[in-house]
Each structure stands twice: as C-alpha cells, then as structure tokens.
Image (cartoon, grey):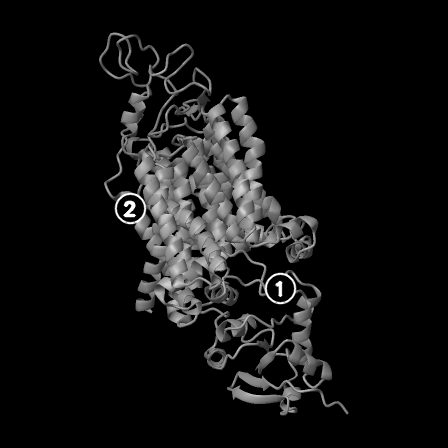
Amino acid sequence: MAADLIRALLAALAAGVAPGYFWAAVLRPASGLAERLAYATALSMASVPAIAVLLARATGAGVTLWVALAAVGIVFVTGVLAFAVKGAARGTGGPLLPSPGVVRDPRVLLLVAGMFALALATMLHMPAPGWLLLVIAAGLVLAGALVARAGPVTATPGNGPVSTGAPAASPSGAGSAPPGGADAGPGQGPGSEPGQGPGSGPGQGPGKPAGTGRPAGPAPGSARTLVAPAGSAGSAASAEQGGLPGPAYPARPARPGLREVALAVVLALTACRAYSGVISHDWPFLRGGDQFSHAVMAEQMLTHGSYGGYLIYPPGFPALTAVICRFSGLTPLELFPVLAPALLVLCALGTYTLASGLWGWPYGITAAALNGLVLESAYAGFAEGRYPDLLAAFFLLVMVAAALTTLYQAPTLRSGVLVAVVAASVVLYHSVATLYVAVLLALVAVTALPYLFYRRERRAARVLLLTLGAAAVLAVCYAALTYDLAGLVTGHSSSSTAVSIALGSQPAPAPRHLLAELGPGLVWLGLFGAGALAVSVRYLARPTQVAAAVTVLLWCAAMYIGSRTAADGFPQRFERDLGAPLAVVAAFGVVLVARALLAQRTTARAVLMVSAATAVVAVGAVVAVEAARGLAASARPSGEVLTHRVAAAGRWLRQHNTGGNVISTPYMNPGISNRAVLAMGGYTGLQSYRAFRIAHPRSLPPAGRQPLLDSQHVLLHPGSCQSAGILVRDDVRYVVLYRFGHGADLAGFAADPARYHRVFQNASVIVYAAAHAPCRSG
C-alpha cells in the first residue's frame, strides 16, 4: 500500500495541485503556504479536467498520457507566463472580518456553559424530547448572540479601518455605545480626519493627545476596550498605526511556526480518521458502493473520453481521475483505496482557508478540526464513495466562499477571475452542488449587490456584478461538456427527464434528523456560532465586511431551507452538505469562548475566571465527545466493502472480457450494487435495479428504463423466448449471479445449460456464458 500511496500522492500533486500554483499566486495575495495550496488545488480542479476532456474528444483516443501531460502543461505554463507578466497579487491576504471582543460578563459565560452542558447530556443518551431540543437550540443561539455583543469589535491586521462600535462590557456587565456610531473608522469620532485619533492635531502621531509623546490609552472609566485577536501577532502595533487605542491587556504574539504545527496536527488526525478503517479492515478494497460508478466513468474517460451511455454525470471527477491514473500507472480501482481518504484532508484544508480569510488562522485551525474530526456527513460522503459530491460540496463550494471573501477584501479584476473560475468549476463535478452554487450566487446578487451600491461601494459592486456574469457564462460552457443544453431548454433530453423525475421525489427528513446526519456536536456548535455571527454583523463598519458575513449566514440558511423541502428534489443532500458552512460558523463560536478564558490571565476576578473556564470545559467536552465518536466509528469495519469472492469473479470477467455487455443481479454482497461487476469486468452495461427502484427511480441511465427492464426480465425469466431475444439484441456475453438474495431465478439458469453455460463459480458468485441462439419454444 505504501508504494501505491506514494505514487498516487505524487500523481495527485502533479495533476491536481501544481498546475494552478502560479495562477493562485497571480489571482490572490500570499497568505501562507496552506492557503496557497488550497487555491492552487481549486484552480487545477477547475481547469485540468476541462482541458483534458476537450483534448480527449478532439483526438478521439480518450485521456492518453499525452493528453494528460498536455492538459497539465497548458495550465502550468500559462500560469508561469501570467506570473512573469503580471506578477503576484499584492497585499497581505489577511483576515477580512474583526472579531467580537472578549466576553467579560460571567452571566453570559455561565449561560454558555449551561446550554452546552445540557447539549452534552443529550449526546450522552439523556432522553431528549422535541421540546428539549428546541430549548437547547434557542438557548445556544441566544448565548452566541450575547457572546458577540459582550465586547467591542477588535482590530485585525491588514484590514484597514474597522469598527470599534460594539458596546464594551463594563465590570458590571453593562455596555455603552461609543461615540461616532458604527460607521466611524478606528479612532474616528465625528469630525476626526483619516489617520488621526481622537484629539490628534497637526504634527501629532495617531492616537496621541496634544502635548504628550505617549500613545493614548483608554480614558479612565471608559467602557471602550480594544482587544487584539487571540494569536494575532502585531495587533497592538496595527491598532496604533490605525489610530486605535492600545489593547486593554498585553497581546501575546503567536509563536513562530505555531500555525503550521497546529494545522499539520489537525490534518494528520483527519488523515488518521480517514485511513484507519481502510488499512485495518478494507485493504486492498475500499468502503463505499458509489466508487464503482466513478471507476466505470474513469475507465471510459481513459479509453474513449466520454461515457454517454452509462450515466448523466459531469466529467470533472472522472477526467481528473483519468489524468492521475495516467501519471501514477494505477487503475481507478487501485487508485481509490490509497487516494480517496485524502479527500477528507483536502476538505479540511478548504475549511481552514475560508475561516482564516474571514477571521484569522486560529479560526481556520478550529474550522479544519471541526470539519475533519467532528463533522459526520463529510466522512459519510467518503465512506459511501460519493467522491464528486464530497469535493464539490465540501471543498469547491467552500473555496467559492473563500474567493468571495477575497473579492470583498480587494475588489479587483484578479479576485473577480478567481471567483468566476472556481464557482463555475462546480458544474464540472456534481449537478446538485451546481444547484448549491447557483443559489449562493443568486443570494449574493440580490443581497450584496444592492447593499454595496446603496453604501456607495461602487468599485466592489461593479467587480462583483462582472464576476457573477462571468461565472454564469463560464458555467454554461462547462455544462455544455455534460448536458444537451438545447434539449434541456426545450425539455426533450435525458437530462431534463432526470430533473423531472428527481423533483419532489424525496421526502424532507424530520428536523431532528439533522442531529444524526451531521452529528449533534456540530449542530449545537453551529447554532451557537451562527447566533454569534449574526449579532456581530451590526458592529461591522465596512460594507464589504457586512457582505462577507451575511454571505456565510445566507449560505447556511439556504442549505437548511433546502433540506426541509422536497421541491428541490434533494432535501437529504442539502441536509448532509449543510455541514460545510456549519463547520465554519461553529469555529467562530468556539474560538470566541476560548478567547474568553485566555483573556483572563491578566485579571484577578475569580468569578470571571471560573465562569470562562466552565464555558470552555463544556464546549470542549462537546467537541471531544463528538470527535472521539467519529474516530471510533471510522476505525470500525464497514458493511459496504467488496468481498474477496465477488472480487474474484470480477477479475475473471476482466480476464475474459471480449466486448459486449453483462447482466448481473442488482446487488452482490451487502451495500455493493451490480456496478461493482461492471467496474471490475470493464463493462458499462447492462445495469440492474431492483423492481421497486425501476418503478420509482430517482435517476435513470441515459438509455432510459428499457435496459433495466431487459436485465430484470432475463434474471427472473431466464428460459423465456423474450430473454433469448434480449441476449441477442443487447449482445450479452455473461450473466453474473449472486447466490444470496432474491434478485434472480437461480434454478432457472441451472436448468438451461444450452443457453447458459457455467464458466465460473465460488461460494458467493456464479458466472454463466450466454449463448446467442434462437428460442426453441414448444
């Protein structure tokens, strides 16, 4: 496994990271290696597969090694040229949003502790009726709101003017509004000039009162207290340069390398969670039934450059898989066991990038930990083999939000291109995630655009408007690689048929099902963080900051609303993929509580110290319990793993593949559908569904329902004349029967050796060679 893992990782770096590295440098300011690699991966995923598909279709030879090299080379070389001509994007790439100040009201901290203690009790199997869950949810939202308004907004380095307009908590817990209003810049009351603090005169440094050479601190008795973000080096200096009063307590700069070490530990733990069960129980196979569909599509991309008769599915992931397979020399079914678990690490890295761009790296580290170790739905996406959905919903869509943050912070042509390319790329990977990004960008268009124009942020508004238009145009171009756009518009295509089948076909789950899908720990933390983020919006001074915070909140709201209605056709997917934005807002709340304890090191108030410690312990216990459960569950064996007996039959089919099609029972061993037989044998059909699924399909192959009915008839009525005609018409070479289950008439096949000659069998599987002979009906 180690050798295959090294080959796969090197090939993935060459195909999925390196090509976009220089483009990432051109389009976004430097903000650390981890974030640079995340943007490079997103840009590579957006461009390399599209170019590979175009070249493969143009040559008609599939994704050959030369096509793979050309696709990677085009992206990499153009990135180098753009870097040489335009240079790297300027700026620091620091966080856009300030954080609420430190909580200094013990009553708020005790409320936080109490609500999370109650939530923890329900996680430990305390009976939880619906009314109690509602009380916990409302209490956590209220606690988050109080935490966000308990202190002033703090300054963050590299952000320009930020608001200091939040009411600070006095020792008694009462706040007072600062002069100047929410729109006042740092240290700018009414009538103050830019770059000058209150009382600054000509020739005086910012923040220095007339006649003194010392920086001005908070006025005696003033409730306005500014606090540097936890771990932000240079925050005090930045505050003074911006005309801000000094911090209320000594700000300790982060130790060199602390961010990198912390992120490495979180990503390593995420990798352990992803690989532990695979190494212990699955190897050489991999848990998850959907992986075989992706293997079939990747095989078809390698040989033909398309898979039009198999599934209506975007070509991004199969094409990227094909390029990596060419570089590594591994087949898709050999590649997935060693590389697919690493997708969870990539998703955690994307969450880190978004949260760091919003509030700073401590929030990013926390978000990565919640995504990789606490969130259950992302791991479920991997464990069930839904790799394109995992990449689209938990990485690319997160990177769209991160790119929007970059645009809000620095509205330039470069940041607009970054948003447009990454947003449109979602179309290449998953149709439901395409709906997500369309809804998100539509919400941005109807909320952020009018707001920015209203607040006279015309440059940001114009860039955002052009960006949304460019993303729409590029998305249509990407969609043309997958769908019959003319038929989709007129309603006469397999794609439009699939859409009409899906709409309204899946009932919305009950509200409390969210706890099981995402994990109760993340839901409770997310509600707390959402309450805090919603209240913190009122204290933001810059319109672009407000737009960024509201975008994240609207993303969460849209995903939750989509999970509660059947009208979109995929409420369960909306519910599952809500975990991506929820992990980000949950990190916001977790760090606010942690900062409340860290800030008490310089105080002598025992009540406040105990309250903060109690809140941190309660929140930490929720995180620890959920993470421990996730690690334990992922280390256990899975029920959806290919058995060695079924794999042996698949290898035999591959060795004796002479073309044509095969028919197999709808399911082999539990959790493994007949698509495993197709993938292992090198076939694309005929697919088999159970009778109920044929009658009530959620999706159909491009060929429609008839091939499914053909498979079903042969399996249930092998001796009929209609079955003999199907074998000839569909060029069926082999019939594969799983001995257990009720998907076929085993006795009927055994009773007709003239038509079905047994060529392989073991304790689980029988393979018959099908004779193409006329029916000899009496």
Examine the image and state in which quarter residue 302 appears.
Answer: bottom left
Q: Residue at x 42, y 52 (%)?
A: 48
Residue 697 on image: x %, y % = 67, 63
Q: Secondary structure at mark 1?
A: loop
Instruction: Indicate left or right for 490 with 561 as reference.
Output: right
Q: Amino acid at mark 1?
A: Pro
* Residue 524 visible from this viewpoint: no
Residue at the spot of label 2: 260
Image location (x, y in percent) of residue 545? 45, 30
Q: Position of residue 310 (x, y in %)?
A: 58, 65
Q: Quadrant of residue 557?
A: top right
Task: In this rendered view, identify the residue nearer to me: 698 or 225.
Answer: 698
The amino acid at mark 2 is Glu
Q: Which residue is mark 1?
A: 701
Residue at the outermost right position: 778
Sort mark 1 into few (<14), some (14-19) or many (20+) by Cα contacts within 10 Å.
Answer: some
Say which residue appears at 36% left-offset and 27% top-offset.
155
Residue depicted at x 64% and y 52%: 569
**Residue 157 percent across, percent down from the top left:** 33, 30
Badge 2 or badge 1: first in the primary sequence? 2
